[in-house]
Amino acid sequence: MFVNGVEQQEGVDYTVKGDRLLFSRSLAQEGRLGPWRWALIFFGIAGTYRKHENVDVQYVVDGAPKLATGIPVESPGR
């Protein structure tokens, strides 16, 4: 398990509950960009520099390593 390329430890950084990974801290997601921000980016006036954390999960199936990247993040209330 990696967040932004940094390995996370089960029991320390996250726990597994069913098919969910529960992190001990909140993970930031940039969210949708509005039309004004898209226009600013398109015309090269501004960029987007909001915090956005990527979750990647490395696992093994039948002895073969697998990697799931860009796992969607849900807030705790969902």
Image (cartoon, rainbow, N blue to C red):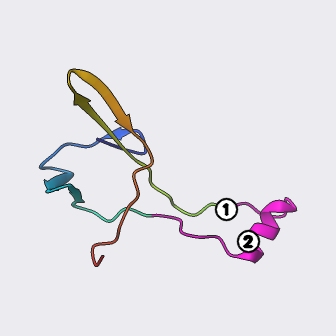
Q: Nearer the viewer, residue 32 or 40?
A: 32
Q: Earlier in the sequence, mark 1 or mark 2?
A: 2
Q: Which mark is residue 28?
A: none
Q: Is residue 69 left or right of residue 48?
A: left
Task: Tally the marks.
Answer: 2
Residue 8: image location, x then y, percent: 26, 43
**Is residue 27 left or right of 62 when viewed as pictured?**
right
**Does the magenta-highlighted stretch encompass residue 39?**
yes
Give the residue at mark 1: 48
Q: Find residue 35 and report its horizontal and vertical position in percent.
A: 74, 75
Tell me: residue 50, above or below residue 77: above
Looking at the rendered structure, the kind of residue marked 1 is Thr
Q: Residue at 50% of width from left, 58% of height from top?
A: 52
Residue 49, position as x, y percentages in the image:
62, 60
Q: Are marks 1 and 2 in contact (CB under 8 Å)?
A: yes
Question: Dot 1, how many residues are within 10 Å of its Cα: few (below 14), some (14-19), or many (20+)?
Answer: few
The residues bearing labels 1 and 2 have C-alpha atoms spaced at a distance of 8 Å
Quadrant, the N terminus: top left
Q: Secondary structure at mark 2?
A: helix
- The stretch in magenta equals 29-48
Name the amino acid type tagged 2.
Answer: Arg
Q: Residue furthest top?
A: 63
Does 58 sit above or below residue 74?
A: above
Label at residue 37: 2
User: 6 and 42: which one is in front?
Assistant: 42
